[in-house]
Image (cartoon, rainbow, N blue to C red):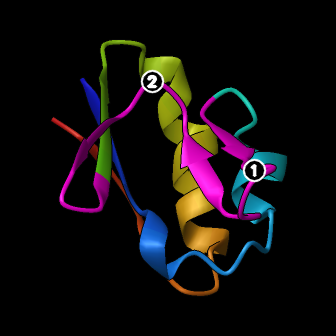
């Protein structure tokens, strides 16, 4: 299982996550911040749990590219 977490409030809208993992992230037209698709929000932490192991590598690359380090990706 892959677990992706996004701290959306700290997003600066650089768009790297969307470029590297477009199936998991998109930019909001309202505020220009990243949105983790199909995620659950708990106090500003958006979390996606998926059994699709193929999303790990692009999501991990997005986390590494994020200049404010607000994306966490784990395999559990």
Between residue 9 and residue 23, name the one nearer to us.
Answer: 9
Between residue 58 and residue 16, name the one nearer to us.
Answer: 16
Classify mark 2: helix, strand or loop. loop
The mark nearer the N terminus, 1 or 2, is 1
State which quadrant residue 12 falls in: bottom right
Q: Position of residue 60 (x, y in %)?
A: 52, 52
Residue topped by disc 1: 27
Q: Is residue 42 magenta?
A: yes
The label number, if any, that marks residue 38 in the structure image: 2
Quadrant containing the C terminus is top left
Q: Position of residue 29 (x, y in %)?
A: 81, 49
Q: Position of residue 75 (x, y in %)?
A: 26, 38
> Horizontal placement of 28 versus 61: left or right?
right
Q: Position of residue 62 (x, y in %)?
A: 63, 57
Distance between mark 1 and mark 2 Cα atoms? 14 Å
> Horizontal placement of 8 versus 65: left or right?
left
> Horizontal placement of 42 versus 14: left or right?
left
Q: Is residue 2 above or below residue 25?
A: above
x 42%, y 13%: residue: 52
x 45%, y 73%: residue: 9
Between residue 32 and residue 23, name the one nearer to us.
Answer: 32
Quadrant containing the N terminus is top left
What span is colored magenta in the figure? 24-45
Q: Are marks 1 and 2 in contact (CB under 8 Å)?
A: no
């Amino acid at each position: 299982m892959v677990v992706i977490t996004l701290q959306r409030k700290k997003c600066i809208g650089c768009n790297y996550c969307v470029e590297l993992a477009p199936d998991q992230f998109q930019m909001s037209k309202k505020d220009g911040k990243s949105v983790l698709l199909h995620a659950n929000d708990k106090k500003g932490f958006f979390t996606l749990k998926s059994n699709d192991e193929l999303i790990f590598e692009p999501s991990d690359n997005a986390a590494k590219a994020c200049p404010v380090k607000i994306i966490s990706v784990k395999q559990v």
